[in-house]
Image (cartoon, helix red, strand yellow):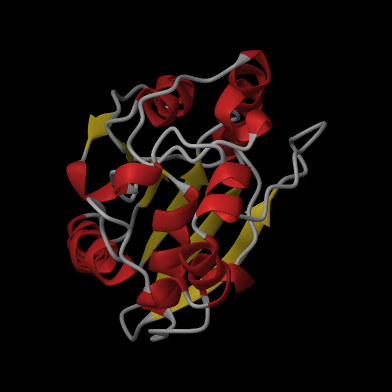
Amino acid sequence: MTDIVLVRHGETEFNREGVFRGRYDVGLNEVGREQAAATATALAREPIAAVYSSPLLRALDTARPIAERHGVEPIIDEAFHNIDLGEWQGAKKETVRVEQADAWALWTTEPELLRIPGGETLAEVRSRAFPRLEELAAKHDGERIAIVSHRSVIRVLAGAVLGMTEGYFWHFYMDNAGFSVLRQNGAGYVIVQWNENCHLADTVYERY
């Protein structure tokens, strides 16, 4: 049995400003750093054997205090890199909504059908992230690990462990620096916790 803690990175200014991040490497803002510290404290109650992280700064700066509490170094893992949003990266969401209305409508209703020019599909995210999750679950059998990643990646992983391929993406809400726990029990996965946020004094609702 392996417990896998999925952590969304803390807040950035792009979250506050309604900007698509994708692989744009924006760091945590002051609130995000406070959230990361609070998440590390919340996750200090049970041992964590390893901490894996997306290579982006906002994820790494969330992973480092968690790893420090457990005497390990965060391990950068490309499998948990954020979705590549191509030409939308760094764009205001409101601008995309107005100027690319058809693509925006698909993103907000059937995102699994959308390929942004220059970017990845959700299926491609799943094809790199879920096999790696499976590998780590087997490698760390009997342990608890943490993976610090991004909202899109965590949603895709949640859908994958539940065997869902479409219609699920917007049904998994998560806060910046919220965490969820998956348990691989040998027969499959169980979602033990979802979007734990009691350690966060304030959160920002950001649906899209």
Q: Residue furthest right?
A: 201
Q: Position of residue 40 (x, y in %)?
A: 56, 28
Residue 2 as seen in the image, left or right of residue 135 = right
Q: Position of residue 95 (x, y in %)?
A: 57, 43
Residue located at (36% from left, 25% from top): 25
Residue located at (37% from left, 26% from top): 60
Q: Nearer the viewer, residue 38 or 87?
A: 87
Q: Is residue 79 above or below residue 185?
A: above
Q: Is residue 1 above or below residue 64?
A: below
- Considering the image in quadrants, where does the N terminus appear? bottom left
Q: Quadrant of residue 73?
A: top left
Q: Position of residue 15 (x, y in %)?
A: 61, 34
* Total marks placed: 0
Residue located at (59% from left, 69% from top): 170
Q: Nearer the viewer, residue 38 or 106?
A: 106
Q: Nearer the viewer, residue 203 or 90?
A: 90
Q: Nearer the viewer, residue 180 or 159?
A: 159
Q: Is residue 12 visible?
A: no
Q: Position of residue 194 (x, y in %)?
A: 62, 62
- Considering the image in quadrants, where does the C terminus appear? bottom right
Residue 202 as seen in the image, left or right of residue 173 = right
Residue located at (40% from left, 66% from top): 156
